[in-house]
Image (cartoon, grey):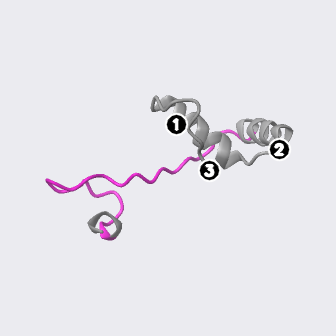
Amino acid sequence: MANETRPRGRKPATGETPSLRFALRFSSQELRRDLAAKAEHQGRSMNVLINEALARSLGWPDDVQVA
């Protein structure tokens, strides 16, 4: 796929779609600790919590399962 071979940081050429990969960096250790504590309390991973928040922000229905 053309998007996978495109150098990082380059804008997509006309007709190309941008990559759907997201990178999340925590600017605060406190945020990371809070998120890790919430994930542990719920018995889920931080990635699942982040994916669910992203899905909600994109307007996906609540019954959609994200992994």
Horizontal placement of 6 versus 40: left or right? left
Which kind of residue does numbered mark 1 sit on? Ala
Which mark, residue 17? none
Q: Could you tell me which secondary element the residue under label 1 belongs to?
A: helix
* Position of 24 relative to 58 (above/below): below
Q: Viewer-proximal residue, 61 or 34?
A: 61
* Position of 13 relative to 39 (above/below): below
Q: Viewer-proximal residue, 10 or 2?
A: 2
Give residue 13's quadrant in the image.
bottom left
* Residue name at image x 58 percent, y 47 percent: 25
Which mark, residue 55? 1
> What is the spatial separation of the Cα atoms under label 3 and label 2, in whole angstroms?
14 Å
Count the numbered circles shown.
3
Horizontal placement of 55 versus 36: left or right? left
Give residue 51's quadrant in the image.
top right
Which mark, residue 67? 3
Horizontal and vertical percent position of residue 23: 51, 51
Which mark, residue 43? 2
> What is the spatial separation of the Cα atoms under label 2 and label 1, in whole angstroms?
19 Å
Horizontal and vertical percent position of residue 20: 40, 51
What residue span does the magenta drawing correspond to?
A: 5-29
| Labelled pair 3, 2 in contact (Cβ < 8 Å) | no
Q: Main secondary structure of the magenta part?
A: loop
Q: Could you tell me which secondary element the residue under label 3 belongs to?
A: loop
Residue that protrudes farthest toward the front in the picture: 63
Q: Earlier in the sequence, mark 3 or mark 2?
A: 2
Q: Earlier in the sequence, mark 2 or mark 1?
A: 2
- Crowd band around label 3 with a 10 angstrom C-alpha radius: few (<14), some (14–19), many (20+): few
